[in-house]
Image (spheres, rainbow, N blue to C red):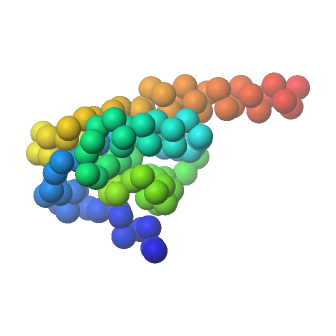
């Protein structure tokens, strides 16, 4: 399966049928914690589908489009859209997800922890 078919435009995402859960994040460095959290969200929400919104981030390692492709490759993700914060807010208002989880703060923390780990190992 070409997982890029999971990647939607904002217009396509705005008319997704419910019920769905939504997760927003940077997903610049995918780690095992992402898999755990996304699987837990899928189970906990009871939603039929899971939409991931990939947001822009300063100092990214990968482009927003590349990060969208990575997230689309995850089994528990049904749809992916790349958007900014304002568009993510509009999608939330339009789709009324059964649950929305914001991972931006966790993504920043995880990236920092990984950098610190690598620096410690090189010292």
Answer left or right for 65 relative to 29: left
Question: Residue visible at 36% across and 40% down?
Answer: 43
- Direction right: furthest residue: 123
Question: Residue visible at 44% across and 42% down?
Answer: 39
Number of labels in the image equals 0
**Residue 85 visible (yes or no):** no
**Front-most of residues 47 and 16:** 47
Answer left or right for 93 relative to 32: left
Using the rendered view, name the quadrant where residue 99 is placed: top left
The quarter of the image holding the C terminus is top right
Using the rendered view, name the quadrant where residue 91 is placed: top left
Q: With respect to residue 73, does 29 lie above or below?
A: above
Residue 51 placed where, x, y %? Answer: 31, 50
Question: Residue visible at 16% across and 51% down?
Answer: 18
Q: With respect to residue 7, does 33 lie above or below?
A: above
**Residue 17 visible (yes or no):** yes
Q: With respect to residue 4, does 121 lie above or below?
A: above
Residue 12 placed where, x, y %? Answer: 20, 62
Q: With respect to residue 21, does 123 lie above or below?
A: above
Residue 55 placed where, x, y %? Answer: 37, 43
Residue 21 placed where, x, y %? Answer: 27, 43
Using the rendered view, name the quadrant where residue 112 is placed: top right
């Amino acid at each position: 399966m070409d997982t890029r078919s999971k990647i939607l435009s904002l217009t396509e995402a705005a008319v997704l049928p419910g019920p769905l859960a939504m997760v927003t994040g940077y997903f610049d460095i995918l780690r095992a914690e992402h898999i755990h959290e996304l699987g837990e969200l899928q189970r906990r929400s009871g939603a039929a589908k899971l939409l991931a919104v990939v947001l822009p981030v300063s100092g990214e390692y990968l482009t927003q489009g590349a990060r969208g492709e990575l997230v689309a490759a995850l089994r528990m993700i049904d749809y992916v859209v790349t958007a900014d914060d304002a568009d993510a807010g509009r999608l939330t208002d339009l789709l009324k997800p059964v649950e929305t989880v914001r991972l931006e703060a966790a993504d920043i923390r995880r990236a920092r922890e990984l950098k610190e780990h690598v620096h410690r190992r090189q010292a």
